[in-house]
Image (cartoon, grey):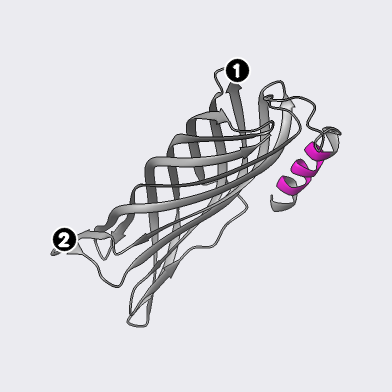
Amino acid sequence: MKNFVFNLFCAFLLYNGSLLCQTGIHEHDGLFIRMLLGAGYAELVEKNVMGSDLKFSGTTVPLRFQLGGEFLKNLIAYGEFGFASQTNPEMEWPGHSGSTSDVSVSVGDLGIGITYYLMPVNIYFSLSGLYSSVQLESSNTKSESEIEFDNINGINVMVGKEWWVGAQWALGFALYGYYSDMNVQTSIEGINYEYFTRNYSIGVMFSATYN
C-alpha cells in the first residue's frame, strides 16, 4: 500500500506537466505549498485499560505541511504530513483524575488529500486521508503505535479562508477536525499490553500558502 500511494503521487506529478509553472496572479494553479500551525483541544482514549477506559485531554499544538498542485480548476491534490503534541494533559481513569506533570502525547501522520477553492472569495474546503500513529510517554512507561500502510486510519477536515499578500502567496486561517483510531502497544511493570485507541482533535490553524 505504501508503494501504491507513492506511485499515485508520482503519477500526479507527471500528469501535471505545468506543476512548476505559475501562470496567473491570484489564481490557484501550478505548484501548491501550504504550511499550517495552530492550537486546539484533543482527547486520546485508550479502550479497556485494565478493565476501564483511560482518557487524556487538553490543549494540543498541531503542525501540517501539504505539497501538490492543481488537478482541475480550483481543485488541488496534495501529499501531506502532520504532527500534534500534548504536554501535561488531564487524565481520567476510574480512581484517578487530575493533571499530569510527566506525560506527553504525540500524534503523527502522513497521507494524501484534496482542497477545493471557492473563488474569488478564496474560501477552501480540505479533506485528507491519513496513515496515523500515536506515542504516549510518562516517566516510567512508553506506549506507541507504528504507521500501518494496510489501511487509512485517520482523516483531517478543514474549512479555511485566505487573503492574497502577493502574486502567489496568501495568508489565512482554518477550522479543523481530526480523528484517528489504531492499536497501541505498551509495557507496564514488564507486562506487554495492547489497546485500541481513539484520538479526536478540533481547533484553529493559521496558514501560509504558495500557489
Q: Residue 70's image quarter?
A: top right
Q: Amino acid at mark 2?
A: Pro
Mark 2, Cα crowd under 10 Å, few <14 / some 14-19 / many 20+, is: few
Q: Is residue 6 magenta?
A: yes
Residue in the foreground of this view, choosing between 202 and 24: 24
Give the residue at x 80% y 44%.
10
Q: Amino acid at mark 1?
A: Met
Q: Position of residue 9 (x, y in %)?
A: 75, 42
Give the residue at x 51% y 47%.
153
Residue in the foreground of this view, choosing between 50 and 27: 27
Give the residue at x 44% y 49%.
181
Q: Quadrant of the C terminus?
A: top right
Q: Which mark is residue 119?
A: 1
Label 2: which residue? 94
Q: Nearer the viewer, mark 2 or mark 1?
A: 1
Cα separation between marks 2 and 1: 51 Å
